[in-house]
Amino acid sequence: MAKFYLKYSPAKSGLTGVEYIAPFIDEHFTNVTYQNVVSDGVLHYGILEGTGDLITRAFLALDNKFSVMKLTESEFTGACFLYYDETAVPGVPTPMPFIGFMFEIGISVTDESILEGVKSFKKVLFKEITKKRFPPNNDSLADLAKCVTLFIHHYGDLTPEQIAGLDAQTTILKQIYDVDSCIAAYTTLVSNLQSIAIEYYSAKSQVDTAETVEDIQAIVYPS
């Protein structure tokens, strides 16, 4: 069973209406569920669950129709803590404490994990601002390709002055990304490959060796 923690904004519907994920999923994707958890008044936070091709199709449909962002469990916990309202309202059942509320949706939290979650979610907001300040993805990818070309194909042809200038830029880059942050990124990359890519390549291999359409359709990823 795959589980995704989502942040999204409702899609426009008609001239003045809006459409939400839960009814959309209920209408179009059986055996896939979406549970809305909290809202900040504009954005909504919830949990999407399902298996096999259906969850993939559902996620692609949501990505096209709604402005969806996938969060980690820690980031999602932080968002829930910030936007869950425990305020008692006359005539309405008193909301349960936050820890109990999170347990009901399948996430066990402690005071420590709540604090870490708020930190994680705050950094998500920072990252969103940072992404908007960078050039478009195509420009960034082009710059990255030029950097790779520079070091692999042109480095031996550089003049001493060009090498000195390049070394100065490298010094700045090392200050931005120190050894510890690079090791942390490498560790995260390997961990993600181990937990995600291995399962993907296993499913891919099963598809490659399948001999009938029925065999292919019976392969479930993620398991």
Image (cartoon, rainbow, N blue to C red):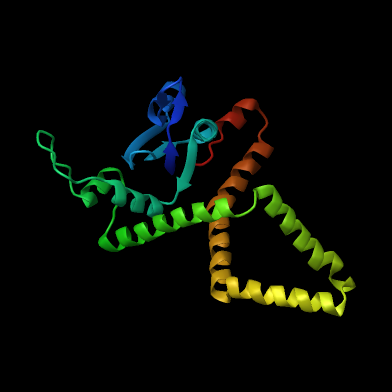
- Residue 107 visible (yes or no): no
Which quadrant of the structure image shows residue 182?
Answer: bottom right
| View extreme (right): residue | 157
- Residue at x-position 54% and y-position 74%: 180
- Residue at x-position 74% and y-position 77%: 167
Looking at the picture, does residue 89 appear above or below residue 78?
A: above
Residue 42: horizontal and vertical position, in percent? 37, 38
User: Looking at the figure, which quarter contains the N terminus?
Assistant: top left
Residue 79: horizontal and vertical position, in percent? 35, 50
Residue 92: horizontal and vertical position, in percent? 13, 34
- Residue at x-position 33% and y-position 39%: 41
Which quadrant of the structure image shows residue 215?
Answer: top right
- Residue at x-position 40% and y-position 23%: 17
- Front-lying residue, 79 or 28: 79
Task: Answer left or right for 203 relative to 40.
Answer: right
Residue 212: horizontal and vertical position, in percent? 66, 27
